[in-house]
Image: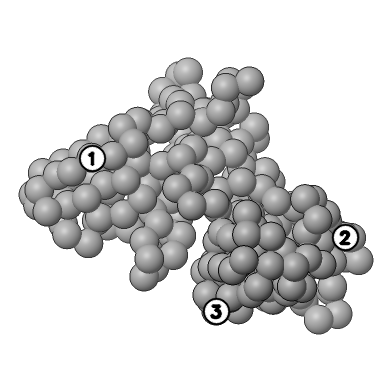
């Protein structure tokens, strides 16, 4: 079945470092891909999305590119801030379905000043 | 517009009791999905309701149940509570379904079972 695999955390970085959080997926066809972020004490919120191959989603300085050839959707940011400390979830929606959303395990990011 | 509202935010119960959690979605959203979040198991899907019908269900025992009302508000119930039910319970609303990936989450109800 469809699945999402994220790199294990926690990921600890210093402020202004470059961030990559890996996400790979297994799915048939062309799913839609999403990154959600959960700040401490809050619910999740959609960070960015991509709905077809080679699409790049971006928001708040974060980017992720839908790579069909490597079945990946890695999250990147050029210079992280302490306020980016959160848990990041990668998710997949199979094509032609309103009924499923497959979640990764989440990656905790800690940014030290 | 108002976001997703979950009540209560915090509650403490003892083993064997039951609990009911409430979720009010964004106005106009017809889909409500529920999730259990724990440090060990991550985010686990419970069920989704759309227009008062359960459309999708995760792999949880029958002690976990839910319903949706005609105004799209949803409740979930956990009967015969166990220590392992301690978790953050999140609900999310969506215009047409969680499969669109465009979910709006509440802040959650944190349940502690003693």
Q: CA distance from mark 2 to mark 3?
A: 23 Å
Residue B31 to residue B55: above or below: above
The colour scheme of the drawn protein is one colour
Residue A40 to residue A89: above or below: above
SS for dot 1: strand
Instruction: Using residue B73 as the reference point, say whether residue A100 is left or right of it.
Output: right
Q: Earlier in the sequence, mark 2 or mark 3?
A: 3
Which picture quadrant has residue A23? Answer: bottom right
What is the chain identity of the residue bearing mark 1?
Answer: B
Residue linked to disc 1: B11
Give the mark toward the camera: 2 or 3. 3
Q: Residue B81, how many percent across, how many down? A: 16, 51
- Please name the residue shown 25% across and 35% down the image: B20
Q: Are marks 1 and 3 in contact (CB under 8 Å)?
A: no
Q: Residue A54, how many percent across, how many down? A: 91, 66
Residue A71 to residue A52: above or below: below
What is the chain identity of the residue bearing mark 3?
Answer: A
- Please name the residue shown 63% across and 59% down the image: A82
Neighbours of disc 1 within 10 Å: few (<14), some (14-19), many (20+) = some
Neighbours of disc 3 within 10 Å: few (<14), some (14-19), many (20+) = few
Residue linked to disc 2: A56
Give the mark toward the camera: 1 or 2. 1
Q: Residue B72, how many percent across, how many down? A: 48, 24
Q: CA distance from mark 1 to mark 3?
A: 30 Å
Res. A27 visible in picture: no
What is the quadrant of the C terminus of chain A in the image? bottom right
Foreground residue among A23 and A11: A11
Q: Which mark is residue A8?
A: 3
Foreground residue among A11 and B98: A11
């Amino acid at each position: 079945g469809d699945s999402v695999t994220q790199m294990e955390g926690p990921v600890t970085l210093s402020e202004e470092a470059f961030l990559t959080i890996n996400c790979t997926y297994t799915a048939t066809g062309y799913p839609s891909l999403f990154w959600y972020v959960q700040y401490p004490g809050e619910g999740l919120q959609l960070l960015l999305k991509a709905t077809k191959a080679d699409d790049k989603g971006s928001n708040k300085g974060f980017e992720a590119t839908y790579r069909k050839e490597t079945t990946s959707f890695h999250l990147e940011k050029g210079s992280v801030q302490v306020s980016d400390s959160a848990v990041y979830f990668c998710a997949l929606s199979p094509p032609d379905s309103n009924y499923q959303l497959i979640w990764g395990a989440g990656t905790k990011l800690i940014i030290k000043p | 517009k108002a976001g997703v509202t979950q009540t209560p935010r915090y509650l403490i119960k003892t083993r064997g009791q039951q609990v009911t959690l409430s979720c009010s979605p964004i106005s106009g959203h017809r889909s409500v999905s529920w999730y259990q979040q724990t440090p060990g198991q991550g985010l686990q899907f419970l069920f989704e309701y759309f227009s008062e019908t359960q459309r999708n269900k995760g792999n949880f025992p029958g002690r976990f149940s839910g319903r949706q009302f005609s105004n799209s508000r949803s409740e979930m119930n956990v009967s015969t509570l166990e220590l392992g039910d301690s978790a953050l319970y999140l609900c999310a609303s969506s215009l047409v379904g969680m499969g669109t990936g465009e979910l709006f989450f509440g802040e959650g109800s944190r349940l502690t079972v003693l």
